[in-house]
Amino acid sequence: MEDAGEHYEEEFGELAVVFGDFHIPMRATDIPEQFKELILPNKIQYVLCTGNVGSRDTYDWIKSISNQCHIVKGDFDENTEYPEFKVVTIGSFKIAIIHGHQIVPWGDEEALHNQLRELDADILISGHTHDQIASKVDKKYILNPGTITGAYSPLKRNALPSFLLLEIKDKLINVYLYQLQNDEIKIKQTTITK
Amino acid sequence: MICINALNSLDEKEINWISEGLKVSYSQKAEYIYKQMNNQSFFGFGSSSANITIELDGLEKRKKTTIRPKGQEPFKLPVYTGEDDISGIIDVRIKGKKLEHQGIRVELVGHIEVTYDNKQNSDFMSMARELEPAGTLFEDKKFKFLFPKFEKTFETYYGKSAKVRYFLRVSINKQYNQKIVQTLDFAVVLPSQDADKIETNPIKLEVGIQECLHIEFEFSKDKYHLKDCLIGKVHFLLVKIRIKHMQLQVIRQEITLNNGVVNKDNEVLVDYEIMDGCPRKGEVIPIRLYLSGVDLTPSYSESTSNKFQVKHFINLILIDDEGKRYFKQQEISMYRKK
Amino acid sequence: MQEDVDQERLLDQARQKVKEQAYFMKKSLDQVNLRDGLRHASTMLEELGVREQVQLNPKNYYIVFMQIFDELRTLEQYFKEEYRRGRKMMDLYESVQHATKLIPRLYLLITVGSVYIQTHEVGAKEILLDLLEMIKAVQHPTRGLFLRYYFLKMCKDRLPDKDSEYFGEGGDVDDCINIITRNLNEMNKLWIRMSGKSRDKPRREKERVDLKITVGENIHRLSSLEGVNSEIYQTTVLPKLLDLIVSSKDAISQNYLIDCVISCFPDEYHLITLHDILGVCTTQLEPKVDIKSIFISLMDRLAEYALRSEDVQATFNSDNHIYSMFKNNIDNLVERSSSTEFKNVLDLMVAFLKFSLRCYSSNSDYVNQILKSCVKICEKQHEQDFQDDCLKNIVKFLTMPLETMSLSILTMDEYPNLMKYLPFSKRRQVAQKITQAVVSLKRNINDQNIAEQLVLFIHPLLVTEKDYIEVSQNDFEEEQNLVCKMLHLVHHDDAQEYWNILRLFFDNFQKGEIKRQRFTYPTMFYALAKFTRQVYEKNQQNEVLNFTNIFEIMKQLIETLAQEYHSLALKLYIQFILIINEFDHEKTLDEFTYDIATTALTIYQDDLGDADVKLQAIQVISGALNKISCLSEENYDTLSSNTTQYSAKLLKKQDQVLSILNCTHLFHGELIKDEESVKKCLKKAIKIAQTLLKTQNKSINLYIYILNRYFVFWNYVQFDVAEVQELINTINEKIGTLEKSNETEALQKYWRNTVQYIKSKQEQNTAGFAELHV
């Protein structure tokens, strides 16, 4: 049985949920129920949030998920104590989180790559564009969870509610891309390796 | 076998006194009397003395009844009913070489005693058999006797102020009006001949205190046999006093004449709680008393004896929360059933 | 106090005596001495009988009773053995009746009777009826109740119930019912007597309540009879019970017994007999009976029942008379209630509402009727009657239907009538709950009438009403956030309908002050943006509903906010430009857009003080302008050059460089690709960096930033390689000279990463990289 325990560790690794651009209530009513049912307290080890949270109750929800919450400040977050960016090491990965409005041109791959270099990270997580992305550039990875509420953005027409779930193992991360299309959850998967 | 040892007694009261004074069981008592007789010689008149023993036939098979005289230890007597003969053997054992006598006889006596008035004492019946004409006995001798279907007028009764006794008395008459006497009590019970035909009437009475208490009680019968069950009920029609409880008593009243004065002696035979608490208007409380648990005798009406009467009453008593008692007596009569 | 001590002492004595006598009883029985056994049992039982002076209070009496109850089991067992040894039960039954003391006699009689029944020598019914008759002798309330309770306990399994061994010869179900109801009737009479009329009535009534379960046991017994089915219940049991209850004319008893009936018998029975029970409750009980509580518990039970089973739910829905039965009886009851019972009446109505919501979850008309009744009740009350408890209930009327009916409550016209009886804080609470419900439901608000009702209901959240009371900032924020969340639910496929609803909210938002608009306006702004997108996508523009008009309103919204909330207004203006950009491909709104942008820049220039805020603002402005294509080149030029100038005027040189680097994108965005200006911009950045580098080596970081920015443009702009090489050289030259610190370490890492990047580009043979040396 003890072996099984270790086996479990090996098999599943640690989980991190990645989301942002809630814009509650300015642009959206709530996180979709389907997502709320997935993202439950004490199931996920890390929360990586790209900002623009909005209302206090949403912050409370985020903080209820895990006690390892990493939140950065979005352009519409006011008076928060949250930093502009954050670099977190999970397993052997160095992950940088930033909202993304600071990186001009917004969503530009080169600009984001530049940011990766500056922050000296393996993975850059940013939001702002409301466009879910997981891409690899030169052995580095750029992730964007999109908007978890499907909030309006002039930059992206009909943004769908989306977030990412990372399953982080020693040398490997499974990235699950969750998206809500017509009330149905669609999941795509990709893998990040060191 | 019950053997009653005779006592050379002159006075029957003496026997009564002895049985009154001794709190011992019946068989012990017999033994005791026997010892008394041997040790004491004050009854003995010189050599001319004898022991008399009366032995009844078939005693083992005969029913016994327990007599419970007031304030005395109960004792058992053999029971004879209407058609029974009484027979037995009288054993005379002489003390010394011979016994001169004026005749030996056995009597069957029915006797009424009224405690407060000796004059009232009388034999209501007496039958005698000569056993031996006057002469001299040189040895012990046994005599058979028989009183066939003797007349039984009354039932044996041991009350507080009156008794009806039946006994056999053997006497050896001697000179100078001296006697050697031995008696043996037995009991007579007389079930009513036609108990089935006894007509009973229900008792129904309304009693009360104006504006205060109004009850109606009902008993199914006015005549009961000794093992009967007293069934009745009490209706509360008006209750303005705070009743605490209700009791039912069965009272035996002995009525005797004492120097021409009527003397009534009440004895509560049973005191039976029949209600606890205060009923409201309209309640009906049941009464059921099994008389077999009560030590009863049949009633004696005036017509059966002019010496005394035994009446029975049921007494309904209500007690309020201040301890005041309200009661109503109602006569019933008791009879014996076969 | 003295009384308590006495009671304690009495209880101790009694218990001791019972223990002692029980011991002797058992000893005698062990020696097969029934006579002595009975004698000791009798003496033991005298502890339950009459006492000379002080009586045990009912609680202590119960303790002694239970002790004796246990001891009597031994005796009962012994009676059974006696029977097996050949003893005639009839004799035994008679002989215990010789006991002259009443209480011991009756307890013994019941005990023998129980065994007698088990022998089947005489029918159960006969013995039970005899016992029932004999125990009438006890008229004392406490003693009588316990004796009869003992009777009930002993006859529990000896009734000639259906499927029982005593059924048939021993009687039938009717007999069981008769026996128990007779006993109930007698017990009830005794129980009622406990109250008495004396001075210590309160104490006696308390003692009385202590004993209620003994009486209720009868009903429990009835309910557990196998032979009682719903039909027998309806035709026999309930009529008997109701008759008995009504004729007792005692409020405490009626209250308790009705409660017992409701809680003991199954709900399906209540359902079929509802008419009878309600009728009796409203018309035949004593005035002091708390009929409302009875109704409440009945409704609660039926509602639970309806929830448990779908079949029942169907019965409720097919038989509308269940609702109307309650309705009629409750109205009747309310009619007769005095105004002092306001709270109780409201409690009743709340329960009725709950019932209705559970059993008729889709019938909003029922709810409205109940609300109407409540309004009537409230009309009769004085202002001072509206105490907190009552208000809480009124809040419940208004909020409970939300949980199950949600938006259909908005069709109930009685809502506002009832709401006006609440003070501001409660109205606010209700409004908030309604809003919460609407938000939780997440269903679209697409009906103008409903929207109008909604606005009416949540009015306390929208404007500052006369009796407004300030709430804490957090609460206020939460409340306004709710309103905002709700607004996003507005939707309609038809543009005009959609617009009308939005407009309705907007009109109301306008009446709220700036402190509300701080929340509602940005939300309205985005709601309008979404609306615009629909109009655009579905091509729903018309004379009134066109971008110009919509954008005018959006502009107004920001203008209002701009008076107080500069940073927010600025961000929204920038968003606004992006929104317009989404639709205005023809640049028809060029001047309008330009105007917005200049307003934003004016705010930047005039109203922002904090350096960090300014830096962020200029980041956003440059980020946005980079995406813009809906301006004329001329206007765009003005904006981009102004923005660049503002960047160069930032307080810190470092910030100037970073900001100018962002501004480089203003010249290579959606609208223009002006390579020269990009180069110029980068050179300007280098120039500022150079001046800084003269004084501090660590400013070399800016060179790294600038170098990397070249790479961002690398694919689009043809740079002079020598110029780039010079940057690399300068960096290489200075980087080694830096003192060690966290800051320089990060810098060195950035540089290492940059070098690696260049090398990998060289490996990939990316154009232009080959000539670079690192």
Image: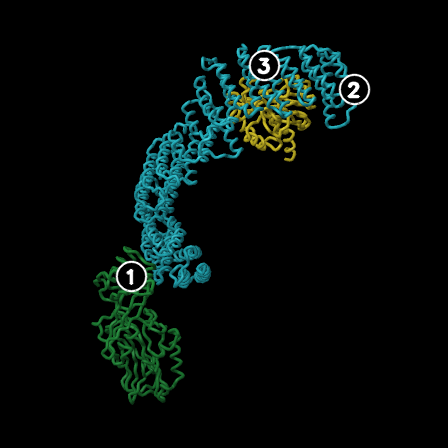
Chain colours: A yellow, B green, C cyan
In the current view of this chain or complex, which residue is farthest to the front? C606
Three-letter code, disc 3: Ile
User: Which residue, given by chain and number where applicable, does mark 2 sit on?
Assistant: C733
Residue visible at 64% across and 31% down in the picture: A9
Left or right: C367 with respect to B189?
right
| Residue B204, above or below C474 | below
Q: CA distance from mark 2 to mark 1?
A: 133 Å
The residue that disc 3 covers is C628
The number of discs equals: 3
Of circles 3 and 1, which is in front?
A: 3
Q: Position of residue C504 (x, y in %)?
A: 44, 23
- Asked if residue A22 is positioned above or below residue C10 in the image, the reply reads above
Q: What whole-number distance in Å separates the C-alpha atoms at marks 3 and 1?
A: 118 Å
Whether residue A14 is visible, yes or no, is yes
Q: Which residue is mark 1?
A: B229
Report the chain holding disc 2. Answer: C
Quadrant for the N terminus of chain C, please.
Answer: bottom left
Question: Looking at the rendering, which quadrant does residue C749 occupy?
Answer: top right
Helix, strand or loop status at disc 1: strand
Q: Nearer the viewer, mark 2 or mark 1?
A: 2
Q: Quadrant of the C terminus of chain C?
A: top right
